[in-house]
Amino acid sequence: MPATDEEHERFGNLGGEYLDVVDTPIEFALLSYYSPVVRNIRPDEASAMLPANNPKLAGLKLGAALLQEINVLRFLSAGGSSSLTAQIGRYEGMLKFICDKNGVTRTEIENFYRQGMRGLVAEIVNEEFNKMSFSLTNLSLDRTYNSVLTRNPQNRHYTLSYKRPSIQNSEKECSAPTLEALLSEMRNGKNKTDFTSADMETVREQAKLIPAVVYADWKAKGLADCVDAMALIIETLTNFYLAPSAQTYEAVVGIYARYLFAWELTPDKERAAVEAKTDSLLSALHSLSNGLSERMTGSRIDIRAASRIPDDPRFNVFAARYTGR
């Protein structure tokens, strides 16, 4: 709100719904750093990410975020889209602005981008593949919670976030260092009246379907040829973002197509596990580049043909149908 119209026009023209309003994450990141008023009121966490007293580091981070989007836009505009070409021009202009303002070169930004891309992809993939969304429904109580169970990829702590969609500002959460401790918190904690024994059993069963948990279980049991599925997803996405091309894109689509193929062949009662993996992949892609996820989900895909690309037996893990129970 404190930003000037001029600042909105300068930093809000990269994309989003309006080209004179800051309405995308990268635009807000730019505004929060370059607007003196906004920079003074941003939280400490934002200041640590984009430090005002280290303009070169901030420039490298902002430049790398822009470069990531430029690379994807160039790939998406291969068909000759004039709107994407114009958008690339705006991104390039902002990249030059950062170079001039923060004293960094494009080469330095490109090196920083290449060095940090795998870490960024790994962070996002690990975050998204450690979540499970589901409903906690009790017909006798006439209530349903929209719930998300998250396992912290670093310390393996569990957090259950839940809310009643019919009630505004009703979101709550409970956390614990282990799944059993979380179930105990649901049973005995301050929000114990929110849950029934059936809810706790549902959470226990849903925890088994968290994609990262399933893949770790398969690998520990020697299933799916002991392929480290999480590492392969990170490798595939990193390869695309470092060198967007038809070949690296087809490998990403190959994972998605195998999930869809597995879903078709999975009995209805076991589909939740496959759906969770598909949702995790799409969420990771959305976090990395909304344009790429929209292209993949919006395109007509020959699932059978795409699920044979790449011709790499490691990718068979994504077509596996068993749930890991």
Image: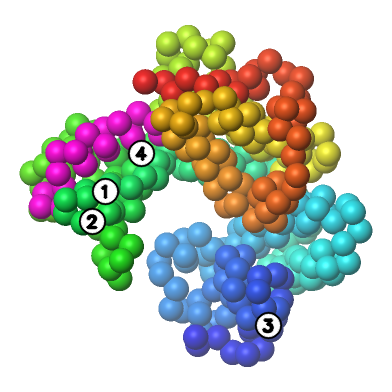
**Secondary structure category for the residue under label 3:** loop
Q: Which mark is residue 151?
A: 4
Task: Single out the mark in the foreground, 3 or 2.
Answer: 2
Please state if 275 lies on the left or on the right of 19 as rendered: left
Q: Residue at x 55, y 20 (%)?
A: 320
Q: CA distance from mark 4 to mark 3?
A: 39 Å
Inspect the image, locate mark 2, and give the three-letter code of the amino acid beneath it. Arg
Q: Position of residue 70 (x, y in %)?
A: 77, 57
Q: CA distance from mark 4 to mark 1?
A: 22 Å
For disc 3, the marked residue is 20
Instruction: Kindly identify the amino acid type of the residue bearing the numbered disc 1.
Output: Thr
Q: Are marks 4 and 1 in contact (CB under 8 Å)?
A: no
- Front-most of 159 and 305? 305
Mark 4 residue crowding within 10 angstroms, few (<14) / some (14–19) / many (20+): many
Q: Is residue 227 left or right of residue 86?
A: left
Circle 1 crowding by C-alpha within 10 Å: few under 14, some 14–19, many from 20 = some
Q: Nearer the viewer, mark 4 or mark 2?
A: 2
For image coordinates 65% across by 43% down, the residue present is 117
Q: Is residue 17 left or right of residue 183?
A: right
Q: Are marks 1 and 2 in contact (CB under 8 Å)?
A: yes
Is 191 left or right of 206, judged from the image as shown? Answer: left
What is the CA distance from the residue labelled 1 to the residue labelled 2?
6 Å
Residue 143 got which mark?
Answer: 2
Q: Mainly helix, strand or loop, the magenta region?
A: helix
Magenta residue span? 192-210
**Does dot 2 land on a helix, a strand or a loop?**
strand
Q: Measuring from the top left, give residue 229's x and y in whole percent.
A: 55, 25
Decide: is 110 above or below 310.
below
Residue on which disc 1 sits: 137
Could you tell which of marks 1 and 2 lies nearer the N-terminus?
Answer: 1
User: Is residue 207 one of those drawn in magenta?
Assistant: yes
| Contact (Cβ within 8 Å) of mark 4 with mark 2 | no
